[in-house]
Image (tube, grey):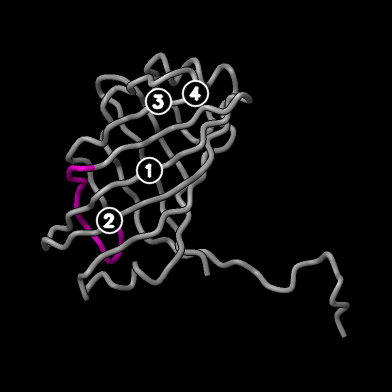
């Protein structure tokens, strides 16, 4: 019999690949030393085994910069699928930069998941589409694969359902 006060896990998390997406970003607007906002431009792409589409307006990334340099994400976006369904996407997350990666990012350099020590978010979805209603019923995790700020800015993620 397992001790109810055990510090070992009593369950496991299983991931399932859902999609990847690339969201085009306008150059960030600096609100103050603790916040920047990056508008999500229309376009980009959303691709997965059961979904295909692009981002449309409105959408933006609100990034709070903590005293430690960690960015706390507050993101909202709208996906239009290739068959004209609308899917609202929202997530919070953490981007932990090194001093070097933060400087490179703000300088407009392309960074990958190898350059930023930690960049994970937890999206949820909302849609009235029957075809995509399964998205309403899952919690997902985003893992950043590429990001760039500046004139040609974008962020790219792989998305996994957590089961």
- Residue pointed to by mark 3: 36
- Residue pointed to by mark 4: 34
- Residue at image position (47%, 46%) is 92
Question: Distance from label 4 to label 1 (Cα)?
Answer: 16 Å
**Which label sits in the foreground, 2 or 4?**
4
> Where residue 156 sits: x, y (%)?
36, 40
Q: In this view, does 57 lie above or below 147?
A: below
* For residue 24, side relative to residue 159 (left or right): left
- Does residue 7 show up magenta in the picture? no
- Which of the two residues, 120 or 66, is positioned nearer the viewer here? 66
Q: In which quarter of the image is residue 66?
A: top right
- Residue at image position (27%, 54%) is 47
Q: What range is drawn magenta here? A: 47-58
Q: What element carries label 1?
A: strand
Dot label at residue 75 = 1
> Where residue 43 sits: x, y (%)?
17, 40
Which SS does the magenta portion mostly show?
strand
Question: Distance from label 2 to label 3 (Cα)?
Answer: 22 Å
- Which of the two residues, 42 or 46, is positioned nearer the viewer here? 42
> Where residue 41 sits: x, y (%)?
21, 35
* For residue 28, side relative to residue 95 (left or right): left
Dot label at residue 88 = 2
Mark 2–mark 1 CB contact (< 8 Å): no
Question: Distance from label 3 to label 1 (Cα)?
Answer: 12 Å
């Amino acid at each position: 019999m397992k001790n109810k006060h055990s510090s070992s896990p009593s369950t496991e998390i299983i991931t399932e690949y859902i999609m990847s997406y690339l969201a085009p970003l306008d150059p960030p607007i600096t609100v103050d030393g603790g916040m920047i906002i990056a508008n999500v431009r229309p376009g980009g792409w959303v691709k997965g085994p059961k979904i295909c589409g692009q981002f449309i307006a409105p959408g933006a990334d609100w990034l709070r910069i903590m005293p430690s340099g960690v960015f706390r994400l507050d993101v909202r976006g709208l996906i239009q699928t290739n068959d004209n369904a609308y899917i609202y996407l929202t997530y919070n997350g953490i981007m932990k930069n090194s001093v070097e990666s933060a400087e490179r990012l703000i300088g407009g350099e392309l960074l990958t998941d190898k350059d930023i020590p930690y960049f994970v978010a937890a999206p949820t979805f909302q849609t009235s589409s029957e075809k995509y209603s399964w998205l309403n019923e899952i919690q997902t995790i985003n893992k950043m694969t590429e990001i760039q700020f500046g004139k040609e800015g974008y962020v790219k993620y792989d998305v996994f359902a957590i089961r």
